[in-house]
Image: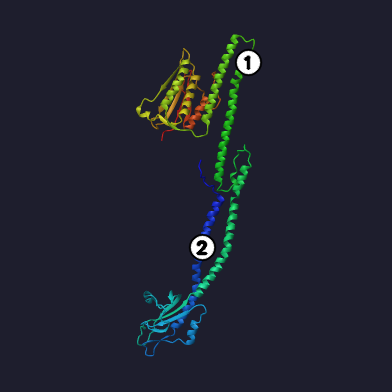
Amino acid sequence: MSFFRREQRSLFGEILDWMLTPLLLLWPVSLALTWLVAQGLANKPFDRALVYNVQALAQLVKLSPDQQSFQFNLPQPASELLRADDADLVYYQVTGPQNELLGGDRDLPQPQEEEKLGSFEVKIRDDEMRGLEVRVAYTWVQLTSEKSPSGTGPVLVQVAETREKRSVLATEIIKGVMLPQFAILPLAVLLVWLALVRGIKPLSELEERIRSRKSDDLSPLDEKAVPLEVAPLVSSVNDLLRRLKDSIGTQKRFLADAAHQLKTPLAGLRMQADLAQRKDAGEDELKQSLKQIGRASVQATHTVNQLLSLARAEGGGAIDFQTCDMEALISEVLNDSLPHAMDKGIDLGYDGVDSEKKRKFLKLQGNPTLLKEMIRNLVDNAIHYTPSTPERMGIITVRLLVDPYSKALAVQVEDNGPGIAAAERERVFEPFYRALGSNVDGSGLGLPIVREIAQRHGASVTVEVAHPGQALPGACFTIRFAPAA
């Protein structure tokens, strides 16, 4: 016994996990993306103000009267207004072509070398000033004069601002977006849970319908009353119910037929026993009664054995297959049946495969017990119905054939008895059916057993006339197995 059992999974919990887990994982991703978007949104208005300030300072850059140097004159009130900010620190810097300071803060970082070769448009970058992160807007100014029509060297104008207001605005944006999500997320979980409850409700209704059924109700379930995804499962259950119904029907029919068939010999036994117990019964009558009792018991025993063989052949369970040598199985059956055939004066023979190349195809996968039972029933049936007189000996031949093209194996049992009429050749395989006009006692179960065992092995059974045109045409039963893979 195993100490560990696999935990039974819940379909509801499985679907809920797979729906909520991505939702909960996407929520922090949404936070990160919202933060990035908020940073971009917070930068835009303040970046525009920086660009405006740079452009305003760039207009204050002039050439000296001798047109040999640059001048930058920023009035004190304008300088104070530029730096007037309650939340952030504002820095500016104006440097000439030789990196000489024309105004502002000297320690404001310069742009990278590759950026100095750019256009004269206003650009924005992130940098660091005195240990603080700043946002810097910068541009180059190039002035022309009569002495230098092509323009003088560029003058760098920069305005920097710390990021306090931007951080505050980004935080406000995130709060405005994230706080509603804290209320929406539990609501989404609740809605998902309610949707799953409603979606799985048809399964619960199907369970209730199945539980409310009576034990003998094997009618199919309504496939249209369930969701499309559950329809294949319901179809499989209906198929199982149909096979179960057929199996129970077969068992009921078998029990009814068995009771009917056993009733006659058992009634005969009782009647003969009553006759033997009469006080006025003579010795001859007593012997005759005992003889009839013995005959009825033999018939009852044979019927019971045939019924058990049919039940075993019709069993729906799996049977054990192994490699079977058909020649050896036929030899065993003939050795067992030979005394009975000799008692009736019947010539029982075997016609096997004489080619060594074909002998390797005489083996197949099957159940040896059932295969021997199949062959024995065919031989017993032939012995039972084949007459043998001094004028005309009964002849039964068992053949083992191999198809020259498909290499498929076939077993034939041929006799020279009265044969079977064409109209009855299919009906003789029905349980308890006896051919009309036959005065031989039998249970009518031998040939149904043969067909059941053949079908369990993927083979087919046919019956034909053995000797057309003769007074006793005989019958030839052929069992054809599928070609070996």
Q: Which residue is mark 2?
A: 28
**Which residue is depicted at the point 49% across and 84% down?**
80
| Residue 143 occupies quadrant | bottom left
Decide if residue 344 is in sight here.
no
Work out whether 105 lies above or below 392: below
Point out residue 7 in the picture as x, y percentages from the top left corner.
Answer: 53, 47
Q: Amino acid at mark 1?
A: Asp
**Which residue is depicted at the point 52% across and 57% down?**
21
Q: Amino acid at mark 2?
A: Pro
Point out residue 396 in the picture as x, y percentages from the top left corner.
Answer: 45, 20
Point out residue 122 in the picture as x, y percentages from the top left corner.
Answer: 43, 77
Label 2: which secondary element: helix
| Residue 354 occupies quadrant | top left
The image's colour scheme reads rainbow
Q: Which residue is mark 1?
A: 274
190 relative to 112 in the view: left or right: right
Label 1: which secondary element: helix
The front one of 181 and 394 is: 181
User: How far apart, in angstroms, are the residues tagged by discs 2 and 1?
Assistant: 96 Å
The front one of 319 and 258 is: 319
First along the sequence among labels 2 and 1: 2
Q: Residues within 10 Å of mark 1 (few under 14, many from 20)?
A: few
Point out residue 125 in the picture as x, y percentages from the top left corner.
Answer: 43, 74
